Every structure is written in structure tokens, then in C-alpha cells.
Image (tube, rainbow, N blue to C red):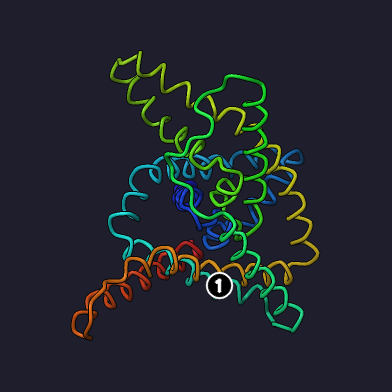
Amino acid sequence: MPLINALKGALIGVALVIPGLSGSIFAVIVGLYEPLLKAIAQFKQDWRQAIGFLWPIGIGAGIGVLLSTKVILWLCTAYPLAAYSFFIGLVLGSLPFIWRKLKKLNWQQVLIAIACGGLMLLITKIGGHQNESDIAIKQLTSLQDFGMLTFTGFFSVSLMVIPGVSGSIMLMIIKQYGTVYHAVSQLLDLLVYLVTGRFEQAGEAFKSVALLLPFMLGAVIGTVIVAKIMHYLLAHYAQYVYAGVLGVILAAIWILAETGVVPAWPAVVGLTALLGPIALIAVMLVLGAIATIYFDRA
């Protein structure tokens, strides 16, 4: 079970970095969302059991984030049609799980789904696009920088606990995506420099990595607060929460198609020339859906 949870955590970590993807939605997809909320919200009641449950997920998420900053984002750039189709498949595979949670769909839930899906699309449009090279804060030089990064962690990570909200989009809204992305990418470089004995370069990399300390402080505070709120809502209004999740999932499919699949669609004419891309998309959709179903049952 710890290994499976670590793999699920890695998938959540990947989703944390890629703009438009939501770590909380992928926590729902792999069946960890409610257990994570319970472990965080009730941490004081049984902290040993909570730590035993959380540590493999945390390690997996950390590995997923580190891989995302290098490998996954490269795949999204080099092979967007395959990568984003796989992501859409992952999301599609969660629909049976969400439907089981809803049980019955009434008009109130339909309205909630439409409202939440529309809000997700609006937030994504507001976030726009920020290049990873746009670094607002390169190193900690003042209390203002510390405060800004603490707020950044609180704002982006706490809202990310809400299913469907993309932490990377939240970072873009407050113009700190490049700052945090660069700091995370420097973490892996720092480890390489230390292992290979390049201490001068390690010192420079640490200046960027240090930005993650106030970010994580704000993230922990925000996560605990919002996790308690979401835990309460799921305990008393679960069907309405999952109605909102359904709307966000449908919006996520639209966002992933719009940002990854449509721009990569080949500019060719003729059914024969399109058979290859169509087949690739179909295969990746199926593989993604199968992966989600597997993780849901694991």
C-alpha cells in the first residue's frame, strides 16, 4: 500500500506543476482526496496514523514535482498530442467514480456543476500564460520578499485543496509561477552540485531554493485551514461537493484539449493523413482511462 500511495502521490505531483492541471482533481481520480482531507483535518487526534498515511504520498508528490520540472514538461512540449491526450484519459477515467458519489443528479447539482465548471474556465482565462523564465523574485533579500512568498504558498496551495483548482494557474494569477517553478527546478540542480562537489554553483542554486521555505510555510498553514473546511463540507454536503467536482472535471477536459491537443493538431488535409493522430489520441485516451481505473481500485 505505501508503494501504491507513493505512485499515486507522484501522479498528483505531476499535476501540481503543469498549468491547467489540478493536483486535487488527480487526488480525487486516484481515490486519495477524502482520505487526505481526513488525515490533515484530524491530524491531532491520531498523528501517528496520519503520518504513516501521509509520508509515502508526500515523497511521491515530491518526486512527481521534480520530474515534472524536467521530464514531464519536456514531454508536453515535445509530444503534446500524446501527453495531453493521456492526461485527458486520466480525467475521463474518473467520471465513473464521480458518478457513483453523486448517486442521483438533480437540478440543484446540475446548476452547481455548471457554475463550478464555468468558474474554472474563467479562472484559467484570467491566469493567462506566464513563461517559466519570468522570475519575479530571484532570492530572498527582504521581509517583503519573505511575506510575498508566504502569501504565495498560502494562496496557491490552500485553494488547490479545492477539487479542480490548479495551483499553477493560481501562481500565474499572482505572477509568481516563474519564481516558484525556477526554485523547484534549482532544487534538483542543488542536489547534483552537492554530490559532484561543485559547491560554488551549489551556493548559487541554494539562493533560489531558499525561496521555497516561506512558500512551504504559507502552504502548510493554508492547507490545514482549507482541508478542515472541505472535510466539513464533504461530511455534510458530499453530493453537492461532487457535483461541483463534476463540473470542474468537464472544464478540465476542455482546458487540456484547448491548451495541449488543439495547438498540436497537424495542419493536414485528408482522412488518410489524419488516421495517425486520431489513432494516437484514441490509444492515449484509453491508456489514461485504464491507469485511472487501476489507481481507483488499488
The residue positioned 43% from the left and 30% from the top of the image is: 187
Closer to the camera in the image, 209 or 197: 209
Q: Is residue 283 above or below residue 67?
A: below
Residue 113 placement (x, y as % from top left): 67, 74
The residue positioned 48% from the left and 48% from the top of the image is: 130
The residue positioned 61% from the left and 57% from the top of the image is: 165
Residue at mark 1: 250
Closer to the camera in the image, 24 or 153: 153
Closer to the camera in the image, 90 or 153: 153
Horizontal relation, residue 93 to residue 236: left or right: left
Name the residue at the bottom extreme: 271
Q: Is residue 112 above or below residue 136?
A: below
Residue 228 placement (x, y as % from top left): 76, 49
Horizontal relation, residue 271 to residue 241: left or right: left
Horizontal relation, residue 295 to residue 164: left or right: left
Amino acid at dot 1: Leu
User: Does residue 116 appear in this view?
Assistant: yes
User: Does residue 1 appear in this view?
Assistant: no
**Label total for image:** 1
At numbered mark 1, what does the secondary structure look like: helix, strand or loop? helix
Residue 220 placement (x, y as % from top left): 66, 37
Q: Quadrant of residue 182?
A: top left
Residue 212 placement (x, y as % from top left): 55, 30
